[in-house]
Every structure is written in structure tokens, then in C-alpha cells.
Image: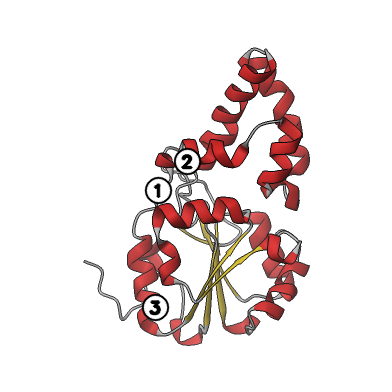
Amino acid sequence: MIDWDEIDSVFLDMDGTLLDLNFDNHFWQEFVPRRYAESHGLTLDEATNLLLPQFRAMEGRLEWYCLDYWSEQLDLDIPAMKKEISGLISILPHVTEFLGAVRDTGKRLVLVTNAHRKSLGLKMDKTRLHVFFDAIVSSHDLGIPKEDPNFWSGLGDLEPYTKEHTLLVDDSLPVLRSARIFGIRHLVAVSKHDTTRPVRPVTEFNAIGDFREIMPESYHFQ
């Protein structure tokens, strides 16, 4: 699937790519509605029915990923709530082996995420994955989400790269589409981004269930 001789830079998403999306799915779909119901004197169904349209309206926008925005909108301490259930944060299977293998090849390894810096810091503290990366870039640093093709040109100002020799692995199809529009050549989707849910059928891009499928050939998986 990947000719590693053609790759100079490896861009990796975080949530749903390196980390199990179960944490974020549980947080936004269950934990936040429950706390919102408790704090506003609502039933869980009432809270869910109020919140879901707000969440959907922000999907693909920078606000969707901004913890400060949601703290203000919902009158909840979202960063503190994330920390409260941080025990659910976990690394997807075979991620650390892949990161180590890519490091061994000498390719430049960059974490490229939409995650807010407060969420990013919590997850790196929990997983220690930051030690593998040459650089970590949040879309909040650029003020534009990865779903916008203009993000990728802005990223090049912070992290120079060649589109034809860059691999992007991400679980978000809208993000992969925006990277394709910009011209990034090597694109891979993660089809098993939440370990509690079935594999998603992905036909639009090359897709992997886990990172063993694109492990550099020089790495012998144990």
C-alpha cells in the first residue's frame, strides 16, 4: 500500500488514528449530555436533544474542537471533565510499534491534529506518545481546521514538506478529502477508529484496520 522509498514526511492524526476514539465518543455522546442534564435540571433525553443539533452545527469548524468554546456555550468545565474520565484514554493497537518503526527509517514524523491544546496536552501526558514526534501541530495554531484545504498550505509554513512525498494517515474522511484537494499524494484512512464499534467500510481511500498493514518493510513485526 505504501512505497516507503517515496515518503519523506509522515503526518499522523491523533484521535481515532493513534488513540481510541471511544474516549471522545463516550465523552461527547454520553458524559457531556449527562452532566448538562444534571446542571440544567433536564432529563438525559432532553439534554441530548438540545445538544446534538449544537454539536452537528459545529462539525468541521474549528469551534467543534475548541474546549474553551464548549465550556462557554454549555456552562461546563469541559477540560476538567475530560481529565475526570482520562482513564478511558488509550492507544490503538500496534501504534507504538509503527511509530518506533517510522522513527527508525529516519522519516520526519509529525502529529497533525484538530485537537485543542488543552485536550492535546492531557492526551500526551497520559500516553507519552509525544516522545516519538519531531513536531506536533494543532489546527488551533493556524486558526483553521484540517477539513479546510487551506490548512495544508498553512501547515507548510510551520512544517515544510513536499506534497508528493508525504503520507497522511487520518480517520476523518473530510480531512482526507481536503488533503487530496490540496495535493497530498499518499493518503490512508483508519477504518477501525473506535475499538467498541465495528470496522467502517471505507472505499474512497486506501484503508487500514491497524498499523501493521503499512508497517515499514524494514520492521519485522513480533
Q: Is residue 65 left or right of residue 218?
A: right
- Residue 117 image position (x, y, % from top left): 61, 56
Q: Nearer the viewer, residue 32 or 216?
A: 32
Q: Residue at x 29, y 76 (%)?
A: 219
Alpha-carbon neighbours of circle 3 within 10 Å: few (<14), some, or many (≥20)?
some
Name the residue beneath numbered marker 3: 103
Of all residues shown, which one is farthest toward the left?
222
Asked if the residue under mark 1 is in contact with the one under mark 2, i.e. CB atoms within 8 Å, the reply is yes
Question: CA–CA distance between discs 2 and 3?
Answer: 27 Å
- Residue 125 image position (x, y, % from top left): 44, 55
Name the residue beneath numbered marker 1: 90
Residue type at mark 3? Arg
Name the residue beneath numbered marker 2: 22
Q: Say which quadrant the C terminus sits in.
A: bottom left
Instruction: Assign a secondary structure to mark 1.
Output: loop
Instruction: Assign a secondary structure to mark 2.
Output: helix
